[in-house]
Image (spheres, helix red, strand yellow):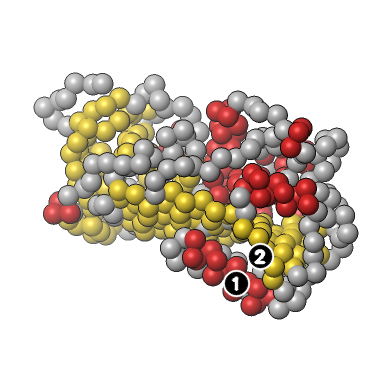
Amino acid sequence: MKKLLLFAPLLATTASALTIANPVVNQRQLNTSGLKIFSLLDAANEHSGNLAFSPYSATTAMQMVIYGTDIEEQKSKTFNELKIFMPPYFIPQPPKIDGVSVVNAAFSHNTFTPLPKFTNALDKFFQAHFQILDFTQPEPARATINAWVAEQTNDKIQNLLPPNSLTADSRLVLVNALYFNDDWLTQFPAHNTRPRAFNSASGAVREIPFMHNTARFNHAERDNVQILQLPYKNGCVMTLLLPRGNDLAPAFALLNQNLGNDLQPARVSVALPKFTLNWQGSLKAALQHLGIREAFTRNADFSRITRDEKLFITDVFQAVFIAVDERGTEAAAATGVGFAVTSIDLNQPIEFTADRPFLFTLATPDNTLLFTGVVREP
């Protein structure tokens, strides 16, 4: 076995066998899986520096992967490992929200012909763009895929696939690209932006631009962590988790908990640093830690993609860009997987001053988790 299938995100059975499960439960499972990857990536980085990640992009790319396994009799070890990570019968629905763009693609080698049931699934459930490339020329093929991702993400993700990620044995690249751009519902007045000190995780203190605004926002405090929600015009919400101290562990512990009953509208004086995050790396080790192991070996079962050649995943890459300013947020992500082969206003507002490390999430109105991040050194 020497053939390569590569998937990149900046998520099988026959259609008649698909079951419709509770979409809320399915989405919660996908969010949980994405947050586990986020925590593992941060741990691999020794809990230092900034990190941005897209749970939605990663799980969408892996949902495309699961359609390539033999799941009709559910005897495939590859399938059983993947279904622990995500609901296997859940048909993903991209967010139909202003300012959010989701596109998927499949790039295949010019001598490789995937089975119709696989390509039909990608077309029907993921509306995937299909393109034929010559992977015997790996670098031109890589440049073509990276250019497509850049176009879909307003040039924010330009090099999703790193050098040498494709070889002459590559056969298929699946890509999910996610782009977000929207204004805050209550914007931060630009004239209120001024320098103030940020106490970084490294211990350094430096002056950076902070945005300021006082308005009514959903707010709570739990386990000595302040929680603030900043809504966008399109209904999406950024949730900030700010510990009272310098330890981010209590904030990480709250990431996947239902905070809805805690949050109450309140008058809040917000001081938030302007920040831009860029992160790029491999998700392979995190996925293996979660139990997806056989898919990365030569024993992998992707017989629903092709029966002519044996395929396995070589790597899964993601690249993320997030910029937060007075107007709102611009963010993009791409993920790739590779196979070889009502409270009363107070006189004094609540103070929310993010002058130390904090976490954030960005989710749709139905709680689809688009982005997560940790800001330690803005």
Q: Earlier in the sequence, mark 1 or mark 2?
A: 2
332 displayed left or right of 207 = right
Residue 182, image x, y percentages: 34, 49
Residue 50, image x, y percentages: 44, 55
Are there few (<14), some (14-19), or many (20+) residues within 10 Å of tag 2? some
Which residue in the structure is indicated by mark 1? 144
222 displayed left or right of 283 = left
Circle number at residue 131? 2
| Residue at 42% in and 34% down | 365
| Residue at 47% in and 34% down | 367
Name the quadrant of the C terminus. Answer: bottom left
- Res 84 visible: no
90 displayed left or right of 360 = right
Q: Amino acid at mark 2?
A: Gln
Say if mark 1 contacts mark 2, CB within 8 Å: yes
Q: Nearer the viewer, mark 1 or mark 2?
A: 2
Residue 320, image x, y percentages: 48, 57
Q: Residue furthest left?
A: 347
The mark tally for this picture is: 2
| Residue at 44% in and 48% down | 100
Are there few (<14), some (14-19), or many (20+) residues within 10 Å of tag 1? some
Name the quadrant of the N terminus. Answer: bottom right
Q: CA distance from mark 1 to mark 2?
A: 10 Å
Circle number at residue 87? none
Helix, strand or loop at label 1? It is: helix
Q: Nearer the viewer, residue 99 or 333?
A: 99
Q: Nearer the viewer, residue 85 or 108?
A: 108
Q: Quadrant location of residue 307?
A: bottom right
| Residue at 46% in and 54% down | 179
Helix, strand or loop at label 2? It is: strand
- Res 66 visible: yes
**Vertical relation: 119 (above or below) 156:** above
